[in-house]
């Protein structure tokens, strides 16, 4: 717990120093801080209160997903929302890393739609994976911004996981499930990991 | 802004949510440079992304050398705007931190989440950028490897030029309710 608290302080201090030099009106500075703080403080939330999430709020989070950029603006995605308890249970029981789905308020399965790929894209290993991943990050950030929490559970590119999930959700062959995003109101505050690694940064060449 | 019109005020006014919905691809930049503080915030946002089994398989090459930006723009078909940008970030995957077996390719998704965070942070700071794909095109990846001296252990993923937008852009309307399905696929 002390470690987590220390990590949160480290993140906050760095955020403050990163934002300190920005001028402008107070309101615009607040907006900048709020948006960046949301990105820096997002954490994976795997335990939920059990409080249901309003359908309009689910839609709001999906809007953030569809605001992601896509290669050649192909938007080759589909979003399968799970609120049904028996489906939640089946997903929770079917994979090693999706146990929390049993107790989530809702889950979203982000799928690539291979019928909508632009000419330069391919069904496996192509751009749609990246597009759907960006959409997934947007949804996790939006959930965090709106007081919810979520966690990303990988499905693609493991064929057996994809097949199992496609079966549970009755997906047509053109939809490939990328992941399961599990959402709910956090049962407890989860501190963000401090993942700042200056050694990951290189200037003007790889060193 | 039009894209936020139909949302309840308390949601449209949520600064972090609003930032996600109003992000746009920015391809034309003024001469104004990016400060060290802005760059730090953007890179910190990038490294705040989730990653499979917390592998953090990413590396970030910051390019602000004018000659290198010009060479990249010349070599890459969809990154011409890099020649005018004050800076570009090349997001890469590090093979040493990729998962074993079939899950190795999860790094693509991790680097995508980090890239989206870069674009969102830039937008939040009043800057703009655009995601230009390198991976999985080997010709674009090889050209980038040569120009930035990237070895075999590192996989160039994309190139994101960032700068101050010449003009404001309205976000595209991409909300399509027909892409949403409840409790299984229903046509």
Image (cartoon, coloured by chain):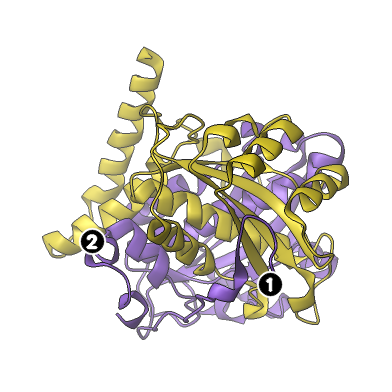
Helix, strand or loop for disc 1: loop
Residue B18 shown left or right of residue B87 in the figure: left
Q: Would you name the residue on which mark 1 appears?
A: A76
Residue A181, numbered label: none
Q: Nearer the viewer, residue A80 or A147?
A: A80
Q: Position of residue B157 (x, y in %)?
A: 70, 58
Q: Position of residue B167 (x, y in %)?
A: 36, 86
Identify the chain of the residue marked 2, using the numbered disc in the image: B
Q: Would you name the residue on which mark 2 appears?
A: B10
For the image, the number of numbered tags is 2
Q: Position of residue A36 (x, y in %)?
A: 35, 51
Q: Position of residue B169 (x, y in %)?
A: 39, 83
Residue A171 shown left or right of residue B172 in the figure: right
Identify the chain of the residue marked 1, using the numbered disc in the image: A
The chain coloured purple is B
Residue at position x 45%, y 57% in the image: A58
Q: Nearer the viewer, residue A148 or A50?
A: A50
Q: Colour of chain A?
A: yellow
Residue at position x 27%, y 50% in the image: A19
Residue at position x 56%, y 66% in the image: B160
Residue A125 in sight in this render: yes
Examine the image and state in which quarter residue A114 appears. bottom right
Residue A3 shown left or right of residue A112 in the figure: left
Q: Nearer the viewer, residue A136 or A204?
A: A136
């Amino acid at each position: 717990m002390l470690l987590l608290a220390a990590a949160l302080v480290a993140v906050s201090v760095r955020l403050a120093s990163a934002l300190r030099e920005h001028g402008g009106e107070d309101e615009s500075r607040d907006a900048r801080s709020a948006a960046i703080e949301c990105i820096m403080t997002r954490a994976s939330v795997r335990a939920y209160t059990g409080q249901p999430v309003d359908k309009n709020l689910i839609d709001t989070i999906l809007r953030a997903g569809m605001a992601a950029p896509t290669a050649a603006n192909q938007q080759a995605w589909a979003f399968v929302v799970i609120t049904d308890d028996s489906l939640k249970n089946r997903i929770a029981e079917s994979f090693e890393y999706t146990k929390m789905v049993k107790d989530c308020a809702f889950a979203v399965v982000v799928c690539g739609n291979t019928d909508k790929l632009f000419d330069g894209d391919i069904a496996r290993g192509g751009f749609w994976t990246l597009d759907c991943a960006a959409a997934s990050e947007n949804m996790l950030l939006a959930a965090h911004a709106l007081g919810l929490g979520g966690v990303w559970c990988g499905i693609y590119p493991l064929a057996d996981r994809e097949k199992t999930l496609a079966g549970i959700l009755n997906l047509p062959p053109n939809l490939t499930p990328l992941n399961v995003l599990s959402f709910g109101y956090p049962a407890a505050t989860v501190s963000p990991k401090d993942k700042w690694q200056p050694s990951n940064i290189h200037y003007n060449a790889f060193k | 802004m039009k894209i936020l019109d139909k949302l309840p005020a308390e949601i449209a006014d949520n600064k972090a949510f609003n930032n996600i919905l109003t992000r746009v691809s920015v391809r034309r930049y003024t001469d104004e440079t990016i400060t060290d503080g802005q760059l730090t915030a953007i890179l910190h946002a990038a490294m705040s992304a989730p990653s499979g089994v917390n592998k953090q398989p990413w590396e970030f090459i910051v390019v602000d050398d004018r000659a290198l930006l010009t060479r990249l723009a010349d070599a890459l078909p969809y990154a011409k705007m890099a020649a005018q940008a004050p800076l570009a970030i090349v997001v890469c995957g590090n093979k040493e931190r990729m998962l074993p077996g079939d899950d190795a390719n999860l790094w693509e998704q991790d680097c995508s989440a980090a890239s989206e965070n870069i674009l969102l942070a830039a937008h939040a700071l009043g800057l703009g950028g655009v995601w230009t794909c390198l991976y999985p095109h080997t010709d674009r990846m090889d050209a980038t490897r040569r120009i930035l001296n990237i070895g075999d252990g590192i996989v160039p993923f994309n190139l994101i030029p960032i700068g101050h937008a010449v003009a404001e852009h309205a976000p595209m309307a991409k909300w399509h309710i027909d892409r949403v399905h409840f409790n299984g696929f229903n046509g």
